[in-house]
Amino acid sequence: MINFAFCIFLSAFLLFQIQPIISKTLLPWFGGTPAVWSTAMFFFEILLTGGYAYANWLIRNKKQTFTYLVLLGSSVILLVFLALTWPSPITPSASLKPLHITSPVLYILFLLLISVGLPFFILSTTSPLMQAWFSNKNPGRSPYWLYALSNIGSMLGLLTYPLLIESLLILNRQGWLWTGGYLLFVLIAGWNAILSLRGRQTPVLTEKSLEGAEGKPKKGFQTLWVLLSASASLLLLAVTNQITQEVAVIPFLWVLPLTIYLLSFALAFSSKHWYHRRIYTLLLTLGTIGWFFLFFRPLTNIIVQIVVYNFLLFAAAMICHGELYAMRPKASQLTQFYLMVSIGGAIGGFIVSLIAPIIFKGYWELYIGFAFVWILLAILSYLPTGTRSAFIKNTLVGVMATIVTVFMVYNIIHSTTGNLYITRNFYGVVRVRQMEFEANHELANVLVHGSTIHGIQFLKSDLRDTPTSYFSKSSGVGLAILNNPHYGAGLRVGVLGLGIGTLASYGQTGDMYRFYEINPVMVDLANGKGGFFSYIKDSPADIAIVLGDARISLERELNTGLNNNFDILVLDTFNSDSIPVHLLNREAFDIYLKNLAPDGLIAAHISNEHLDLRPVFWRLAQYYNMDIALIQNSANEDDPAAFKSIWVLLTRNPDLFQSPALAGRLDRLVGYSTDIRLWTDDYSNLIQILK
């Protein structure tokens, strides 16, 4: 028995360790967007479904042991081959980094398939297969406790990653350590497969049954298995997307919702005593009230938001998984049961990763998912007893389901009204709206990405070339450009983050502005699609827009011999709700400085609702021996289009800070210090800089 238990535990541990390892590897290749993680989760859910289907087929195959051993051996051969060509057997070579990818989801799926597809598929077959073999060798004993053990292993695999593995080992070493654990698994799983040949017999069925007269689960129950599993999976990815959009795409914020999801599985499947429908209906009600509060108070502290969303996820997942356990079939049908549950999980991932970005104009799957859980709960709460207490209870659940559904519909309608343009793609939701400035009553078009304004342009012809919002003439970047010695004399400016191209308004004849942007929607709008914005078209400077992740693009330009030699490099990628950490570390600055002129300046926009980025830039300035200063700007009547902003300036040429227009505005951070470590590709800690 211990050999089956340990094999299941180890496989689950490895199964959920590999997810953050490979996702963190691929994250900077695609701009650090939250969709990388949801796409990876969808891939893993698809393979998990395939693994369960394979286990369901294999357990009925007379050559199951031979077939399983051949598959194990094939995975070892593949890992050996990849070890000879990649940094580690599961971390892809840098030569596979994308340049111009029109379908990021498909390319991410391809990278995941060639790097971890086969080992993950084998690991995903382990729990149902080993439970079936255990049931064959131990007739009369329930195998479902092994499924709970599997989820405990999964949770430990997840939790040890951000708390231990990530902080101690670089990615390549993480890959090698995981490979060592996988080889141990292969030995144990192979031994269990051989043992399963001995004394194989038909199990005695003792589980509480929901089967029909012919010994197969009823179609209605199979449908509920799929719907409950799909709802929980959809909410897992939707909640993860929500909280990573608000802070950053980091392993901790991936791991937290997934750990809660797995905890609900472990509790529900370990014993029927963990789940009581009335208790979790009350918890779901409390979580829903908190959710309503966040909707009407969107600027609530981010920690409170994370707690509310994850509490709501836990209550909803416990209901879905508790009801699944209550409808579990006999042991003879467990592989089919797990297959149907995994199909539901894959459907949830499919909706969030592939369907929602195509058919939805906003992140509506979060609202749809919670509404559907309430609807399912209302259906499951129906009791044909005819008692008054049952009627009242069902009525209350039905009322809540109705309220949440109405709220969902209201939010969807509300989010689509008042927009001149709205679209959603892999990188998020982009809207164009119109607003009127109170100070001068002028109309302007506004670009909003997610919940962050990324550019404003006046409609009036004599104001259309006015730099606005965070880029006004009184802002840090405005002062840096206007007072640069090369301004109007061939100034070379690089900009990470296009927005609507506002900075092009500073361009003079002979100047060069080179924008780097990963989102093609932004490029289309900045280039004049729809006629909303014209900064790029109207600028007399030489304008170039490079599509793709900025860091990868700058690195490739260096490798091809392009000498950008920027006088000013603008980093406008950190003021949104989710920051790309890979653009804010030592490896990124190595690339920036190689593209910067010797007397050049880096101007970084660090206005952010949730994060204080000053200590990160201060540490980078110390490491590279650069002068650092802040310019904080407030909205004022003299410049009605100016937004409150914070810019940090870094340079190795202190003379740039001596300009009279700059000197009086600079905060040189005299006496400032921090004890945070230098951020690298292998280390970053956003918890330390939360406001």
Image: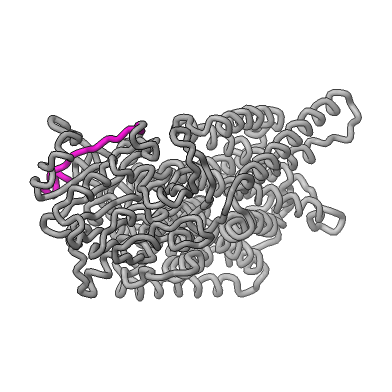
Q: Is residue 27 above or below residue 380?
A: below
- Going by the picture, which residue comes out furthest to the front? 462
Instruction: Tell me the quarter of the picture where residue 276 sits.
Output: top right
Q: Is residue 624 left or right of residue 388?
A: left
212 on left or right of 476? right
Q: Position of residue 125 (x, y in %)?
A: 56, 62
Residue 414, image x and y in percent?
64, 41
- Residue occupying image coordinates x 36% and y 33%: 635
Give how far across and how far down residue 606 sits, in percent.
Answer: 31, 42
The one of 227 and 246 positioned closer to us in this rendering = 246
Can residue 33 be seen?
Answer: yes
Q: Position of residue 44 (x, y in %)?
A: 52, 59
Residue at the spot 33% in from the left edge and 48% down from the top edge? 165
Answer whether residue 497 is magenta in the image: no
**Visible residue check, residue 322:** no
The residue segment tinted magenta is 621-636
Residue 624, relative to residue 519: is it above or below? above
Pick out the residue farthest to the right: 386
